[in-house]
Amino acid sequence: TAVMAAFAKGAPLTVVGNASTGSSEFWYVPAASPVQSMKDAGGRTVGFSTVGSSSHMEVLAFLKHYGVDAKPVATGGTAATFTQVMSGQIDIGWSSPPFGIAAAHDGKIRIIARGNELPYFRDQTIRLIVANAGWLAANRDLAARFIQAYRDTLEWMYGDAAGLAAYAKFSGAAPEVAQQVRDQFYPRDGLMVDRISGLDAVMA
């Protein structure tokens, strides 16, 4: 939506690929919370990052989808949100993996909802790879090589054990957490650079 808004205002942008289709974000509560799902969010506060973000749109969609009257609250990044949840300042927090997955494994929090529960987000491209239109016109061969390298990297990430080990090291996550994050929250199909989908939902 940010790219579309900029383009509509005349920004010289050209989309060259998909960076993410579907949602990796999730919502959680402290382990002792009585809330079991977003259906129980009525009368409670629900976190999102910033106004206009994908987490903001997803929270609004959750409330509409389940017909609950909750209060969306901008809580900032994942670490700040975690502090607010665990200190009781907010009832339901948001996160994006790998942050929060280890806490769920340790029983500190419970994941109660994932963005991909919402059918209109599950198949919607939410992040893009873009280029300045003038640069792209003058450097099409370079852009094409970049996109091919992107494809090759994805093949390595999902097809080679070394890719998973590299991700675990990069993210600081335990190997089993890294695998859960990769396979459950960032499925390969959602990252394929040639896939753009859900434009009708984005326009709406």
Image (spheres, grey):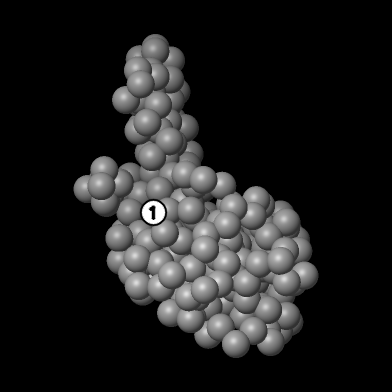
| Res 6 quadrant in image | top left
- Residue displayed at 66% across by 67% down: 90
Q: Residue at x 57, y 57 (%)?
A: 73
Left or right of residue 100: residue 200: left
Question: Closest to the observer: 96 or 167?
Answer: 96
Residue 33, by quadrant, is bottom right
Which of the image's four quarters has the N terminus?
top left
Front residue (pair 198, 76): 76
**Can you give x and y, in whole percent of width and height, for residue 75 in the image?**
64, 55
- Judging by the rendered image, the residue that carries numbered circle 1 is 21
**Residue 87 versus residue 142 in the image, above or below:** below
SS assignment at label 1: strand
**Left or right, 152 with reference to 86:** left
Label 1 crowding class (10 Å Cα cut-off): few <14, some 14-19, many 20+? Answer: many
The percent position of residue 101, horizontal first and vertical second, equals: 65, 71
Where does the image place residue 25, in percent across and percent down from the top left? Answer: 52, 62
- Residue that sits furthest to the left in the current view: 200
